[in-house]
Image (cartoon, helix red, strand yellow):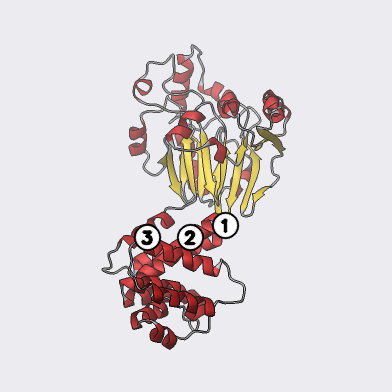
Amino acid sequence: MEWFIFERAVLEFTKYFPKEYQKKPFFYHSIRVWVFLWNQGYSEEIQIAWLLHDTLEDTKISEKEIENLFWKNVAWIVKANSKNHLLPKEEILEDIVKRCSDYGIDAMIVKIADIYDNFLFYKKEKNFSEIERCKKLADLVLKYKKEHDNKIFYFLEEILSFDNKIILLWSWDTLWTPVVWCNCEICQTEKRTRFGIFITYNWKNILIDANPDLKLQFLENKLDYKNIDYIFVTHTHTDHINWLWELSFRKEIPVFYSNDEINSRNMNYFNYLEWEKVIKRISYKNFEEIILEKNIKIIPLPLNHGFPTSWFVIFLWNIKIWIFSDTNLNLDEKILENLKNCDYLFFDWFSENKEQILELYKQIWEEKTLEDLEKIWFHTTIEELKKLKNILKPKNLVVVHISHIAWKYNYLQEKYKDLTIWKDSLSFNF
């Protein structure tokens, strides 16, 4: 490389260095990406064009001066990477990507390097709006990729794969499948762990319920206990809270639970975890908003489970997630009205029908009738849930908390194609 030419570029860069406030460190950004391009083995023209790529926008240097000091190709790459502020604001980003694509691969390399470094910077700064802007630009680059083929495009994958997501770590009922005392075909062939959901949004991680299988599922999903920011407990049955014993590091994770007498009493079993500064217990009241962070709001509401139980209305910016773990459909009309048209509805589905529930009671040597179930049963069947779907019309209905008495997963998936039947460790992004 002609080092004196590069030094000349640095001198010109600093000569026209902008004095006004910048969203990110201007000089550091440019030098950082120059090192990236040098390490990737790109030409000196691309490296110098990168160093000067913002100068037409942010300094008083002219295109003609860049061409006279360096090469015409450098000036054209810089021009292709400069915004046309005469356009409407909503057209500027697509215009700059299209011009880079039209000019050629050199201009595209500079633009992708710019997007990638911005992504890394704003990811570190936790600037969600700028991350979304980087993802939009990455999409536009792929749209105008044309026949260009270069290793630089692979760096876009890291940007586009950075997503908020919901992981249904567990999707089944209180009994781990296989059940110890059961010899049914399901227990012979399938593994079903207990209910819980892990939500990642805007660099915050929310765990819904802490069942005894959590360690296994965290290992399988390559998750880390230390990354949990909040825990919400629907109710204090053992299959929803017993994992809390596993916690040992002193992070004072906020654990939200219902303030009723029964759940409060059961949470007293974890007093020592609070004394050791492992958790911080916070009781909630149904119908009261809980603001966790900017754009993260959760509202607990009562369910009908024969035990004080809550479901959660979760607002993540413009995404609405409703989570029902254990309930039947004897719910307040006001609650059902608020359920309409949500983005994701996770709903209890214990069995296909109530006859299967009667068979379950027989397995534990109890005889029940359908009339008995009306009084003592607090879960939902698929027959009931399909009716509910027609009323609520959620964009995505996901059935959870399924018993081992329901048939094999592949069979259920084929039979109920209009529903999303969850299984362990499945996830989707939003």
Q: Which of the 4 image quarters holds residue 9?
A: bottom left
Residue highlighted by disc 1 = 125
Identify the residue at horizontal 58%, vertical 68% (top origin).
23
Q: Are marks 1 and 2 in contact (CB under 8 Å)?
A: no
In x, y percent, where is residue 242?
A: 58, 25
Q: Quadrant of residue 46?
A: bottom left
What is the residue that sits farthest to the top in this orientation? Answer: 365
Residue highlighted by disc 2: 119
Question: Relative to residue 172, is residue 42 drawn left or right?
Answer: left
Q: Nearer the viewer, mark 1 or mark 3?
A: 3
Q: Position of residue 258 (x, y in %)?
A: 68, 34
Q: Which amino acid lies under the numbered mark 2 shown in the image of this protein?
A: Phe
Vertical comparison of 227 with 178: above or below: below
Identify residue for label 3.
Answer: 39
SS of the residue at dot 3? helix
Label located before the other in sequence (1 or 2):
2
Is 170 or 219 nearer to us in this picture?
219
Q: Say whether residue 249 is visible.
A: yes
The label number, if any, that marks residue 41 in the structure image: none
